[in-house]
């Protein structure tokens, strides 16, 4: 066993100083541990499946920098490729051949993508895709689902997931009502609700955007027929279907959720894994739609650092590693071992729980479930999750600090790591 009663003196000092320097002491809200209580850990370095804090404690990491680290942190081949690229400079602000290479890889892998545009984050990709949906259809309204997160742009901060759900924020002050008036919402997995919205807003809905497997309200899978139903409804009403695969892309399958479930959207947003740990986002889709983007077409979207050689290099190398035979089989096996184990321990120790996984993405809710949507997810015992999270941390296991975030495994996690995690979970859950 490792790290029981860990000392985190340096973490505490650094975080205390950070609180005077940055709002909440962090650069992104969920990191502040607001919903699980206690102090966040300040980290020093990462490698493989592990992360070390500034006090020298080592943790098995199931956050993976929120998704990108699917090959394991600081993979030697990614680092080595980055060293080579670095010698040629950090950014050209002009075309570079690496963009072609990554673009081809994405187009080959993701069924809906015939052309792609690189940006610097998932938020940017979702903002841009929304403008494109509206321009292509000449309609303004869009449907999103409760608990789904598509970045922090104004028009998506309506019943959003991730930090908005974690912190229990209603939506966000500063977002003009006029901007969100066109954002319609429905419960995830509720086709009837979507149908009703289309009927109530004839010829007005540009499209439907969703996380095909939700990761920002905890881990929620689509019911059988849900994605297919959305495909049919959007087609019937002349609207576009957009999969936000920022989290699921190259994670639940090489070709993302669309490859896994065989439902092909019109447009797709990506991020996280395709940047291999550097800031990259992307959106892509049918050529006819993507050709509307400037300078090929009139829809404006741009970026100083977009497609920079470092980010492209990390993405290319990461996808190369993922493209090897057996990768997704391994991720599936290791993650199943984890979720099956956690559910069994919950049952043995008398804690109501439900959860699951697809490939390297997983979740565990402290509620009997089943969880089909955000309302169901909110029935989870978040207080218990907070205690579980703290207990796991003290046993050297770093989980996402929120009941409403999915967890991530990587190619670097071994069966022994999972066993160690389960042994910790058994101790923690027995004592809760
Ligand atoms: N969409 C989804 C599905 C996400 O999970 C996230 C980030 N967690 C985003 C969009 C926003 O991406 P970023 O944080 O890179 O802006």
Image (cartoon, rainbow, N blue to C red):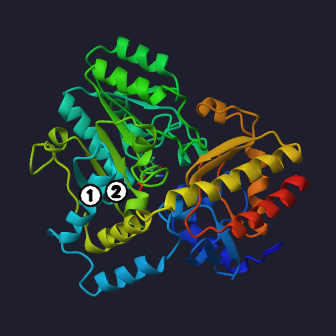
Q: Is residue 323 shown left or right of residue 418?
A: left
Q: Is residue 93 shown left or right of residue 403?
A: left
Secondary element type, mark 1: strand
Would you say the beta carbon of the disc 2 residue lies within 8 angstroms of ligand 1?
A: yes
Q: Quadrant of the N terminus?
A: bottom right
What residue is disc 1 on? 118
Can you tell which quarter of the image residue 105 is in?
bottom left
Q: Is residue 80 shown left or right of residue 64?
A: left
Residue 380, percent across and down? 72, 38
Lower sequence index among marks 1 and 2 = 1
Residue 361, percent across and down? 57, 52
Residue 8, percent across and down? 73, 76
Can you tell which quarter of the image residue 413 is in?
bottom right
What residue is disc 2 on? 281
- Kindly report the distance in space between the C-alpha atoms of the residues bearing marks 1 and 2: 6 Å
Rate crowding at label 1 as few (under 14), some (14 to 19) or many (20 or more) other CA atoms within 10 Å. many
Q: Is residue 304 visible?
A: no
Can you tell which quarter of the image residue 174 is in?
top left
Q: Is residue 122 visible?
A: yes
Residue at (64, 51) in percent of width and height: 402
Would you say the beta carbon of the disc 1 residue lies within 8 angstroms of ligand 1?
A: no
Q: Which mark is residue 50?
A: none
Residue at (19, 34) in percent of width and height: 135
CB atoms of marks 1 and 2 within 8 Å = yes
333 over 236 or under it: above or below = below
Residue at (81, 39) in percent of width and height: 352
Q: Report the number of discs.
A: 2
Residue at (42, 27) in percent of width and height: 228
237 over 98 or under it: above or below = above
Secondary element type, mark 2: strand
């Amino acid at each position: 066993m490792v790290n029981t009663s860990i000392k985190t003196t340096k973490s505490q000092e650094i975080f205390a100083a950070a609180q005077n320097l940055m709002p909440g002491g962090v650069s992104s809200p969920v990191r502040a541990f607001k919903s699980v209580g206690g102090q966040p850990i300040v980290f020093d370095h990462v490698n493989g499946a592990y992360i070390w804090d500034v006090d020298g404690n080592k943790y098995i990491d199931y956050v993976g920098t929120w998704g990108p680290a699917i090959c394991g942190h600081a993979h030697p081949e990614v680092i080595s490729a980055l060293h080579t690229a670095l010698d040629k400079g950090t950014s050209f602000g002009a075309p570079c051949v690496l963009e072609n290479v990554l673009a081809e890889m994405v187009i080959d892998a993701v069924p809906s993508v015939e052309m792609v545009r690189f940006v610097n984050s998932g938020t940017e990709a979702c903002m841009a895709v929304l403008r494109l949906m509206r321009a292509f259809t000449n309609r303004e309204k869009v449907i999103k689902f409760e608990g789904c997160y598509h970045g922090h742009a104004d028009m998506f901060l309506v019943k959003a997931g991730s930090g908005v759900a974690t912190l229990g924020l209603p939506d966000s002050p500063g977002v003009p009502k006029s901007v969100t008036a066109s954002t319609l919402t429905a419960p995830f997995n509720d086709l009837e609700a979507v149908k009703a919205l289309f009927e109530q807003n004839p010829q007005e809905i540009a499209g439907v955007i969703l996380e095909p497997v939700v990761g920002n309200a905890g881990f929620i899978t689509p019911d059988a027929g849900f994605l297919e139903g959305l495909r049919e409804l959007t087609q019937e009403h002349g609207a576009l279907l957009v999969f936000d695969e920022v989290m699921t892309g190259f994670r639940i399958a090489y070709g993302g959720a669309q490859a896994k479930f065989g439902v092909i959207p019109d447009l797709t947003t990506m991020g996280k894994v395709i940047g291999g740990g550097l800031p990259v986002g992307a959106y892509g889709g049918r050529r006819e739609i993507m050709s509307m983007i400037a300078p090929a077409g009139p829809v404006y979207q741009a970026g100083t650092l977009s497609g920079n050689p470092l980010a492209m290099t990390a993405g290319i190398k990461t996808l190369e590693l993922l493209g090897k035979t057996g990768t997704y089989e391994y991720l599936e096996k290791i993650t199943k071992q984890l979720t099956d184990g956690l559910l069994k321990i919950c049952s043995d120790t008398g804690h109501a729980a439900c959860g699951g996984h697809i490939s390297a993405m997983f979740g565990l809710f402290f509620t009997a479930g089943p969880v089909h949507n955000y309302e169901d997810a909110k029935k989870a015992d978040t207080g218990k999750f907070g205690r579980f999270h703290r207990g796991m941390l003290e046993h050297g296991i770093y989980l996402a600090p929120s009941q409403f975030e999915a967890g991530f495994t990587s190619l670097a996690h071994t069966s022994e790591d999972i066993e160690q995690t389960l042994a910790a979970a058994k101790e923690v859950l027995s004592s809760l």
